[in-house]
Image (cartoon, rainbow, N blue to C red):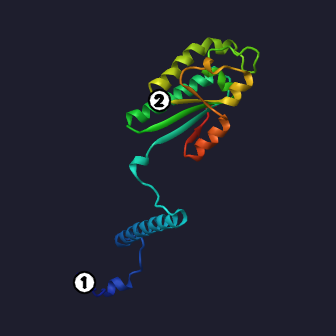
Amino acid sequence: MQQRLRPVSQEAAEKPFNPASEGAQNMNSKTALTAHKYLLALAMLFSTVLTGTLPSISKADDIAKVVYHVDFPDPRRFSSLLTSVNNMVTYYQNELIEYDVRIVFVAHGIRFVTDDKLTGTPFEEDAAMAERRQNNAGRLASLRSVQSVQLELCDITRSQIGLAEEKLYEGVTMVPSGVVQLAKLQSEGFAYIKIE
């Protein structure tokens, strides 16, 4: 359909242009939307040229990936971490969001994945740890068994203090290096969280 141009009245022709007028706002909104779509298409094309693949926007790729880093000795701080992890996975479950949440234990973190007192090591049990061990252990076991949180321990830490793998809690898996695992997971898109 072809539109005909209407002649402009003398009054309209002499009126200065007002960018706040309704017509100008509609034109600017439409222009901005068109520009936004154009830039998005250009970005996708540029991405395709660089990588040789189209960026994935599939819902199948929507998975929340989070890694928590535990390298501290404080059982109260660990209790706060357990609360944080529980709140996160409960939210994901309620919203029907798939998730992969992991806790990587390094150095002092080994205290939280065994009932061994670690006597004679830098990670030896103190009064605060003895007081909170059972409560924290039960909460950690629940996160693993009920909410599928993965527990990963640095094997360098374990082997340096000579702790047998049989003394670890059920479901704790060994990774060759905890810090390497943290870096690897972050490169795979995991969000990194460390409770302070």
Mark 1 vs mark 2: in front: 2
Instruction: State whether residue 107 is above or below residue 16.
Output: above
Q: Is residue 79 left or right of residue 160?
A: left
Nearer to the camera, 166 or 154: 166
Q: How far across and down, in percent of the image, does residue 106 sit?
A: 67, 30
Can you tell which mark lies on residue 167?
none
Label 2, residues with CA under 10 Å away: few <14, some 14-19, many ≥20 = some
Residue 116, quarter of picture: top right
Q: How far across and down, in percent of the image, does residue 181 sit?
A: 63, 38
Q: Is residue 147 left or right of residue 105?
A: left
Q: How far across and down, in percent of the image, does residue 101 sit?
A: 51, 35
Q: CA distance from mark 1 to mark 2?
A: 62 Å
Of the numbered discs 1 and 2, the one sitting upstream in the chain is: 1
Rendered-image quadrant of the C terminus: top right
Residue identifier under label 2: 148
Residue 3, quarter of picture: bottom left
Label 1, residues with CA under 10 Å away: few <14, some 14-19, many ≥20 = few
Q: Does dot 1 land on a helix, a strand or a loop? A: loop
Number of numbered discs on residues: 2
Q: What kind of residue is marked 1?
A: Gln
Nearer to the camera, 97 or 164: 164
Q: What kind of residue is marked 2?
A: Ser
Q: How far across and down, in percent of the image, does residue 160 sit?
A: 74, 25
Residue identifier under label 1: 2
User: Which residue extends farthest left?
Assistant: 1
Q: Is residue 33 left or right of residue 194?
A: left
Rendered-image quadrant of the N terminus: bottom left
* Residue in view at x 46 percent, y 37 percent: 99
Circles 1 and 2: CB atoms closer than 8 Å: no
* Residue in view at x 68 percent, y 13 percent: 117
